[in-house]
Image (tube, grey):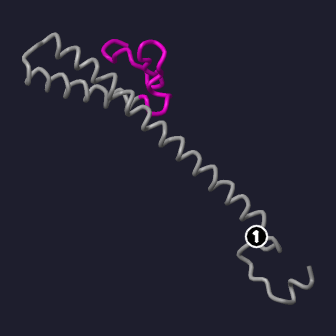
Amino acid sequence: MAGEGDSEPGKSFKLLGFLDVKNVPCARESVLYGSVGSLVMGLGHFIATSRVRRSCDVAVGGFICTMLGYWFYCRYNLAQQRIRQRMLKEGMKNKILFEGSYLDPEKKQTGSERSDS
């Protein structure tokens, strides 16, 4: 249909042809923060030196550094979160499995229960 644009609701955006920004965790935020870092560093260098070509180089370098820096930071936090989720899931499974049994660590054992086992 004319006038609706080329984007489909389920279509994803691929950066440089291989980085699927919609489906890869941390990719969208990394590109956005990289763009902001590029703008800030390039403009800051231009205001300080008034050299256009060098400011563009600084902007590209700022984009790469900011994007990679946030990418590693975000992926590290994501890995830590997944580890915590896995530990919590195992703990919940063990709690359900051992609840009410003699292996339940929260169950108070009395002297008579210890002699029976």
Residue 96 image position (x, y, % from top left): 73, 64
Query: Magenta part mainly helix, strand or loop?
Result: loop
Residue situated furthest right in the rendering: 116
Residues 83 and 8: in front is: 83
Magenta span of residues: 1-27
Q: Kindly identify the residue that appears in the image at 53 percent across and 45 percent down.
A: 80
Tag count: 1
| Left or right: 76, with 93 as reference point | left
Residue situated furthest top in the rendering: 53
Residue 28 image position (x, y, % from top left): 39, 29
Q: Quadrant of residue 98?
A: bottom right
Q: Quadrant of residue 64?
A: top left
Residue 92 image position (x, y, % from top left): 67, 60
Give the amino acid at mark 1: Glu
Residues 20 and 102: in front is: 102
| Left or right: 111, with 70 as reference point | right
* 94, above or below 74, in the image: below
Badge 1: residue crowd in 10 Å (few <14, some 14–19, many ≥20): some
| Left or right: 93, with 9 as reference point | right
Residue 87 image position (x, y, % from top left): 64, 53
Q: Which residue is mark 1?
A: 99
- In the rendered image, the quadrant that contains the C terminus is bottom right
Whether 82 is among the magenta residues is no
Q: Kindly identify the residue that appears in the image at 80 percent across and 70 percent down.
A: 103
Q: Quadrant of residue 101?
A: bottom right
Tell me the SS state at disc 1.
loop
Q: Kindly identify the residue that appears in the image at 12 percent across and 12 percent down.
A: 52
- In the rendered image, the quadrant that contains the N terminus is top left
Whether 2 is among the magenta residues is yes
Q: Kindly identify the residue that appears in the image at 54 percent across and 41 percent down.
A: 79
